[in-house]
Image (spheres, rainbow, N blue to C red):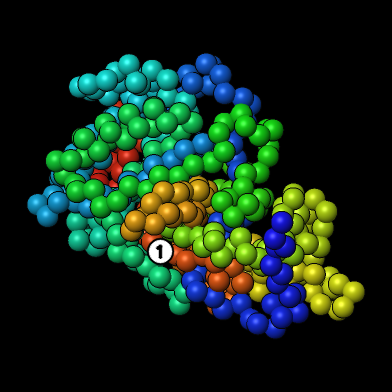
Amino acid sequence: MAREPKVDRRRLLQGGAVGAAGAVGGWFARDLTDSSGSTAADARRTEPFHGRHQAGIATGSQALTSVLGLDLRADAGAPALARLLRLLSDDAARLTAARPALADVAPELAVTPSRLTVTLGLGPRVFTEVLRTSPRGAVTPLRSFRTDALDARWGQTDLLVQVSGDDPVALSHARTVLLRDARAFTATRWVQDGFHSARGSQPEGSTGRNLMGQVDGTVNPVPGTADFDELVWIDGAAGEPLAGGSQLVVRRIAMDLDGWEKVDRAGRELTIGRRLDNGAPLSGRRERDDPDFEAVDRLGLPVIDAASHLRRARSEDRSQRILRKAYNYDGVEGGKAAAGLLFCSFQADIERQFVPLQQRIADSDRLNRWVSTIGSAVYTVPPGCSAGGFVGDRLLAAAGVR
């Protein structure tokens, strides 16, 4: 049996951390899946669509997601946007409640939603060119980082529709309905699908793994706490149109799995700053132990390298944290096998929270040698709506659109 190639620790420490491309701290995305086992009762479980916040954000992570990037047609102005959001909201409210959408040609596929959620987002151009308004919480384009290798195929769009759930049939049906009803107003730029471990395949509370084999992280604000509210929801007075919404970053991160497999176990752990077996920081024993960045080994070298992904993704400023909800992807792109991470993060303010984190990673992260960010987009996620309303109704009303 061939011996696994070695990575010299001292040489890796001296070699710097500049690599081919940047990633974000999605490798520490906490798996929020409620793994109680997949049953017929699970298939009937619903997540409420109406409420102060949109579903799919504080919702525990589902097994599957499909993120749709849509562009408004050239002749679709603000009134058309209002009609579209009203239509999509009605579709989503019905489908997530186990009811078929209006004129649903396959209503039987809607009866087992399996925690289906639909989350809607608006890109920067919607505010600057369609609504011509800039309320508190409206996103602006995200600049590129030095290590980005962006492909326009996965770039910014006007609208985002994220459909998530635990059952592939229910998810596919919902996506088909939503795309059909959006067709009169939009063109589909891209569809990005992602997955976690199947519901019930791991003990309850377990953290999942990404396709590099790493435990996919532990650090996330906890829904329902003041910490979560401050970090995730856009604040503001009750009358502000985006108060209670969020801002979303979507990054497509390609992995060089062939290259990663050539690195020995010690080299992988040094790069990430965590153990492979249980995800514990190299300075600790358990996954959720706080990392000790001052600890040194018997040679006097840092136990957790200053350029490890754990160290670069961690800030001393707790206000810079984000809610990471990342999914694996695989498939074929350009005739070649492709795999990576569909990284989604929700935060109250992208510039204040996400940008400093991503800048640290782009500056010096050893993981950059094996990952490359090939797609990037940002969206404002409006607050939720009440029954009879639609997502974005307060925003449209504030802009004078009826």
Q: Residue at x 69, y 77 (%)?
A: 12
Please say whether residue 236 is visible from this viewpoint.
no
How packed is label 1: few (under 14 Cα within 10 Å), some, or many (20 or more)? many
Residue 44 x, y percent position in the rendering: 47, 19
Q: Position of residue 130 (x, y in %)?
A: 19, 56
Of residues 202 and 68, the one nearer the viewer is 202
| Viewer-nearest residue: 9 or 246 | 9
Residue at 53% in and 16% down: 41
Q: Is residue 6 above or below residue 197?
A: below
Query: Which residue is painted at 25% across and 38% down in the image?
Result: 179
**Placement of 340 over or under 21, stated as above or below:** above
How many badges with numbers are in the image?
1
Residue bearing mark 1: 374
**Quadrant into which the N terminus falls:** bottom right
Residue found at the very far right of the displayed protein: 298
Q: What percent of the width, then of the height, locates residue 71?
A: 22, 52
